Every structure is written in C-alpha cells, then in structure tokens.
Image (spheres, grey):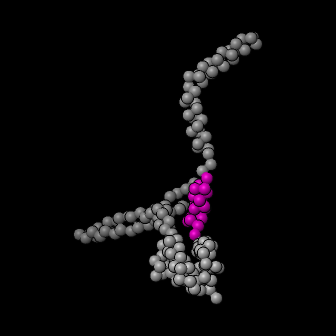
Amino acid sequence: MKDDTKEVLAGRLRQLAQYVGRNKYILVLLAAGLLLLLWPAGKTEKAAAAVRETGEPAFSLEAQEEKLAGLLTRVDGAGRVAVMLTLKTGAERVVAMETERQEREAGEETTREMSEKPAVVSAASAVDDAVTLRYEYPVYQGAVVVAEGADSGSVRLALTEATAALTGLPSSHIKVIKMK
C-alpha cells in the first residue's frame, strides 16, 4: 500500500514539473507582477498619505521663509539674512460640486432652481468626505529681505533676483533692506 502511494505521489510530482516547464514564462510574469504590486512606492506615497491624513498638503509660511533665508545667506556678500513673506491667498482645497436642478410647477408658471453642493464620496468609515479636485498653493503678495550686505547694489540685485525666482514675485514687490 505504501508503494502505491509513493508511485501516485511521484506521478503527481512529474505532472506538476511538466506543467511548470510548459508554463514557466507565464509563472515568471505573474511573479514579477506580484513583486511590483508589493514594491514600496517611496516618497510620493508618503506625501499622498500625508495629504490623506490631514486633508491637504502641508504648507508652512515660516518654513518657506526659513528655507529662503538659508539660501539667500549663501549669496556672496549677503551675510546674515532674514526674510518675511506675505500671502495674497492662502492654501485652498478645491472640491467637486454637484449641480441639482429642480422644476416646480405652480399653475401655469414653472420655476426652475439650481443648487450646488459638494460632491461627497462615502468611504468604509462613518465619515463622508468631499471629492477633492486639486489643491491650490498660496500666492505670494510681497517679500522683505533684510541682509547685512544690502548696502552693496550688486548684493541687493542678487537677493532680489533670487527671491523673485523662488517666489514668482515681480521685483517691484520685493524690498531688500540693510540689517543693522
């Protein structure tokens, strides 16, 4: 009885080996696809997770000012630098809107009303969330750069051009002042 079981098992293993041999390329493709699905997504997935958790991308005016000041400090002759930025508009989340049309008949007159409300998606959780179309980042209104080396015209020009390039502001909205 044991010999019969061994022969059946050996026969099954031979059939499996033949099946794998005939379909080895398909199995390799399936394994590669599974590996790609399980591969970590990296920084973009972390950023998307941060957006999902907070509801909007992270933006800090103070952090932007510090980054800009750190960069401007590296300009030749600038010395220590402090930066203040003002915003025209803040960060904004633009959501999809649903338009609802209603017609009411009152005698011979028909009135038509239209109303808009945010499009909502129901998740597995108990909280419904509006459908986000995009996030609009803040728009800068002006900048003041205070630098030790601002008494030099070439340093002022370099600081103004660098600030304009990084913020999108025209040079007329950037003021560079000497630090005391």
The residue located at (29%, 70%) in the rendering is 111
Residue 40 drawn above or below residue 122: above
The residue located at (64%, 17%) in the rendering is 14
* Region of the chain picked out in magenta, as a range: 42-59
Q: Quadrant of residue 65?
A: bottom right
The residue located at (59%, 55%) in the rendering is 45
The picture places residue 73, in percent across and down from the top left corner, at: 62, 75
Residue 78 drawn above or below residue 33: below
Please identify the quadrant where the N terminus is shown: top right
The picture places residue 30, in percent across and down from the top left corner, at: 57, 34
Q: Is residue 56 magenta?
A: yes
Disc tally is 0
User: Which one is nearer the viewer's eye here, 21 or 97?
Assistant: 21
The picture places residue 105, in percent across and down from the top left corner, at: 29, 67
The picture places residue 27, in percent across and down from the top left corner, at: 58, 30
- The chief SS type of the magenta part is helix
The residue located at (58%, 42%) in the rendering is 36
Considering every residue shown, the one lying at the far left of the view is 108
Please identify the quadrant where the C terminus is shown: bottom right
Visible residue check, residue 125? no
Q: Is residue 4 magenta?
A: no
Residue 175 drawn above or below residue 50: below
User: Which one is nearer the viewer's eye here, 25 or 131?
Assistant: 25
Q: Is residue 105 left or right of residue 84?
A: left
